[in-house]
Image: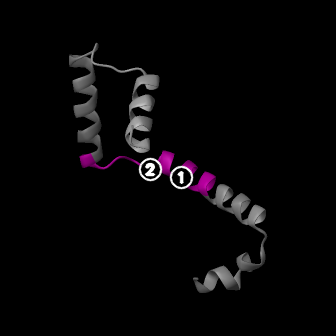
Amino acid sequence: MHSAFHQMGIDRLSVAERLTLVQDIWNSLEEDIERMPLNEEERTVLQLRLDDDEAHPDDILAWETIKAAALRRWSGI
């Protein structure tokens, strides 16, 4: 474990308290990430995906279909 883990007393927190801490840290990162600008590669990938979506508007699958296929693959069916 990292020394900060021990120095800050995180190792003495209960599992529930550590999960709450992790969620709080995740939420703080999420807010900062939302404000981060995209780099050129990310912008290009998003534009390509948007262009493809606009060029093929009927090329979609329902979430239920995707989920069922993933579950079949995962369970070995």
In the image, farthest residue toward the front: 77
Residue at the disc numbered 2: 36
Q: Residue at x 61, y 86 (%)?
A: 3
Q: Amino acid at mark 1?
A: Asp
> Residue 71: which quarter of the image?
top left
Q: Which mark is residue 32?
A: 1
Disc tally is 2
Instruction: Give yes or no for contact between labels 2 and 1 (Cβ–Cβ under 8 Å).
Output: yes
Is residue 71 positioned above or below 14 on the image?
above
Nearest the viewer among 23 and 38 is: 23
Nearest the viewer among 41 and 35 is: 41
Q: Residue at x 25, y 40 (%)?
A: 45
Quarter of the rendering occupied by the N terminus: bottom right
**Disc 2 to disc 1, how far (Cα)?**
7 Å
Q: Which residues are magenta?
A: 26-41
> In the rendering, at what x and y percent does residue 6 appear?
68, 84
